[in-house]
Image (tube, rainbow, N blue to C red):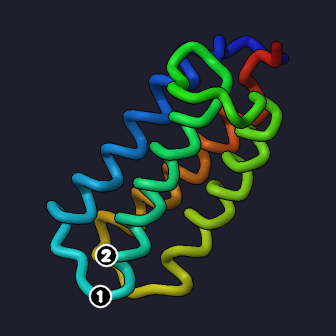
Amino acid sequence: MRFVPSLAHGVADYLVGWGMIVLAFASGAEGAGFIAYLLLGLFAIVYALLTDYELGWKPVLTLPAHLALDAAFAVAMLLLPLLFTLPVMLLWTSVAIAFMAGVLVATTKMP
């Protein structure tokens, strides 16, 4: 059931990371919620850069290791609204990102 190419997965990684950074600023989030959203977005970009796939810069992580980080990222995104006060826009975005990350973990082709 794994049909998503790693290239498409990589594009999604960078879009989500940058999108989270932009949303942290655009949503009016403040305090710990703002910082958490910003740091998780940066984390997504950093581990994408370190993954051994087409869009990686320095191949340190295997794709299976990257997918494990994606699973942890999905859980973190689900917990974010429970742990921090977030604007409504970020609350629902967190749930959507968590769902999409879970789907990508389950459907990305392995090398």
Residue located 65% across and 27% down the image: 59
* Label ID, residue 1: none
Q: Are marks 2 and 1 in contact (CB under 8 Å)?
A: yes
Q: SS at mark 2?
A: helix
Residue type indicated by callout 1:
Gly
Q: Which residue is mark 2?
A: 34
Residue located 42% across and 65% down the image: 39
Q: CA distance from mark 2 to mark 1?
A: 5 Å
Residue located 35% across and 76% down the image: 35
| Left or right position of 39 against 53 | left
Q: SS at mark 1?
A: helix
| Left or right position of 59 against 81 | right
Query: Residue 41, relative to residue 51: is it above or below?
Result: below
Query: Residue 77, relative to residue 15: is it above or below?
Result: below
The quadrant the C terminus occupies is: top right
Residue type indicated by callout 2:
Phe
Q: Which residue is mark 1?
A: 31
Position in image of residue 82 (x %, y %): 55, 83
| Left or right position of 59 against 111 | left
